[in-house]
Image (cartoon, rainbow, N blue to C red):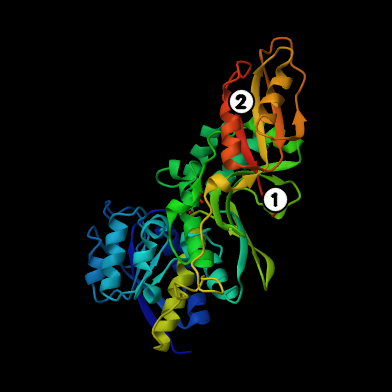
Amino acid sequence: MTLTEIRLGIAGLGTVAQGVLELIRRNHVLMQQRSGVSLRVVRVASRRAKPEVDLQGAQFSTEIKDLVTDPDVDIILELIGGDTVALKLIRGALAAKKPVVTANKAVLAAHGNELMSGRGQQLLRFEAAVAGAIPIIQGMSGGLAANRLASLFGIINGTCNYIFGEMEANGTAFDEVLAEAQRLGYAEAEPSFDIDGIDAAHKLTILLALGFTGTFDLSSVFIEGIRHVTVADIRFAAELGYKIKHLGIIQNTEAGVEARVHCALVPLNALLANVNGVMNAVQINSDGAGETLFSGPGAGGAATASAVLSDVLALGKQMSAGNGIGVMPESDSNKDQSGRQPVLVSMDDVASANYLRIPTIDQPGVFAKVTQALSEFAISIDAAIQHEASSDQAVVDIVLLTNDVAEGTMNAALERLQSLDIVAADIVRLRVAPTL
Ligand code: HSE
């Protein structure tokens, strides 16, 4: 096989960049055999001082823009993160007609429409931006290209999934598990992005654009994180037959497209309930393929590097074939049969069943007051748990599952419940996942 050498310039030297260097070192011969592309890292740029990392003979620079100007760099790997320097670098590379591979979901969620217009469609690839090692971008834009997508349910933040798993298995406190996720290289530089749902929303924005609307619009995604969930909620949910997962959900409904990230109760026997630790999974329902499940490690240096290098090899193969490069469908490919752009449904109109944990003072008549308040909003109760209070316990949790209620109505009912004098602390409300 004739080999084509592709020279790489890497921006950033964090967990993912180091994972890329290590995977090239370990598997470069295998990659050559499979693709006919020989990868050589010629330049690494990071604004931080050069760490003790084997750069495989590449030149080191603290000037990120050198990657664009260096004529020896064929493909730029943007592995810095954030949306300031990274955005400038991607814009510069595209202007210079240099292909870019990025793992940066934040920059795509905020600037995807600009970056993926014009030559970005050919030059910019981002498999690693969503769900780590899982080839979900190639799966959706290639494998499922012939399908109209009905729904997508995803565990798309490894840190949240890892935190819930550890809280469930060991009753470990939230902060302690988060620190471990940071140590393992799963969490974002700013971990509030993980636990407040922002990272998942960035990824869902990309999946929404790719499979449903053709437009990158972070503001159309409802976002809620995981800070309010306690070990007690995980245990009550299990008693009711559910696991708590942080989900990204997109549904194509009669009213339009719903897009949201929040915690959700998932039935114990659902496939997604059994996706554990840092694993991610994306379940897609489409008209031709039916139900498909993509699963794999969603974070970590080596796993993300695998996705980065799949893009690099795909670009390298196209460059070596001299066919030019292309990957994305046209941006209006998601219009419906009549050519209309899909409508986004407001979160107020989305209906869900709800889990409520209501901490109440321990006195007669409390349960009746709670059910009375809910009935004022025509909300009915599908299941309830109240454990016997111990003699020294002043606050007792009432746990309820409601019927399907529109978000706006549920929020009004929650305000009313929270104002009752028998409610002793903040109510925890979690939505039940739609039928997966
Ligand atoms: N912080 C992210 C996660 C890393 O935990 O999923 C991968 O995007």
Residue 324: mark in rendering = none
Determine the residue positioned at 54% across, 74% down.
Answer: 338
**Label 1, label 2: how many angstroms apart (C-alpha)?**
33 Å
Q: Quadrant of residue 292?
A: bottom right
Q: Quadrant of residue 86?
A: bottom left
Mark whose residue sits in front, 1 or 2:
2
Position of 7 with respect to 193 (left or right) is: left
* Label 2 CA crowd tier, 10 Å (few <14, some 14–19, many 20+): many
Instruction: Determine the residue located farthest toward the top in the rendered image.
Output: 391
Name the residue beneath numbered marker 1: 274
Residue nearest the observer in this picture, 226 or 299: 226
Instruction: Measuring from the top left, give residue 164's x and y in whole percent.
Output: 61, 40
Q: Amino acid at mark 1?
A: Asn
Residue 305 shows in this picture: no
Residue nearest the observer in this picture, 170 or 131: 131
* Label 1 CA crowd tier, 10 Å (few <14, some 14–19, many 20+): some
Q: Of marks 1 and 2, which one's residue comes earlier in the chain?
A: 1
Check whether the beta carbons of the residues at disc 1 and disc 2 lie within 8 A of each other.
no
Position of 306 with respect to 376 (left or right) is: left
Q: Quadrant of residue 401?
A: top right
Q: Amino acid at mark 2?
A: Leu
Residue nearest the observer in this picture, 267 or 300: 267
Instruction: Measuring from the top left, give residue 217's x and y in whole percent.
Output: 43, 57
Does residue 62 lie above or below 358 as drawn?
A: below
Determine the residue positioned at 34% across, 76% down.
Answer: 119
Determine the residue positioned at 25% across, 74% down.
Answer: 96
- For numbered disc 1, what is the local secondary structure? helix
Name the residue beneath numbered marker 2: 417
